[in-house]
Image (spheres, grey):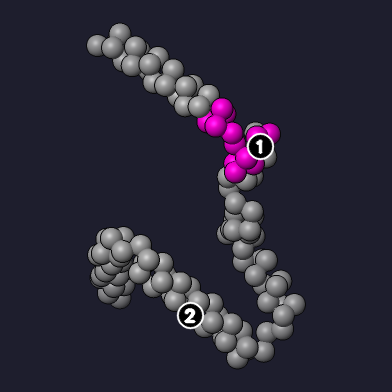
Amino acid sequence: MLKIWKKIARFFDRFEDRNRHLLSRYPLLYAMVGGVGVVLFYRGIWMLADDFFISSWASIFLALVILMSIGLLISSFVGDKIIMSGLKRQHKISLATEKEESEELQRIKNIEKKLNKLLTKKR
């Protein structure tokens, strides 16, 4: 039985890789197919909840428990970049000035130079 599941998983893994490769050439089509898939998935979950007579409050509670237990609640609604910029006390990413960006680029270049010097000394 386990071999059958492995074959099925391998088939869908390859199938997904081929489709992603093909659709990546056509971003608009990729977005449309992905959007349809997401909407149909949510619709199916919604209808399943209706079939089991799950109330709106129970849906909210169940969703919170699921999202919190797998670590997706915060990252889904706030985003990792916003949390990290807040922890580092940075400005919002959208408010970064050209000066800040050029300073960051210069720091990266300096680090690359130092790293290259270290690598050449080791050889």
Element class at badge 2 = helix
Name the residue beneath numbered marker 1. 91
Queried whether the magenta region covers residue 95, the answer comes back as: yes
Query: For this view, does 25 lie left or right of residue 110?
Result: left
What amino acid is found at the position of numbered circle 2 in the picture?
Leu
Residue beneath label 2, please?
A: 40
Residue 79 appears at what percent x and percent y? 60, 51
The first of marks 2 and 1 along the sequence is: 2
Element class at badge 1: loop
The furthest residue to the front: 98
Quadrant where the N terminus sits is bottom left
Q: Is residue 20 left or right of residue 63?
A: left
x, y (%) of residue 42?
Answer: 54, 77
The CA span between labels 2 and 1 is: 37 Å
Foreground of the two, 104 or 88? 104
Residue in the foreground of this view, choosing between 23 and 6: 23
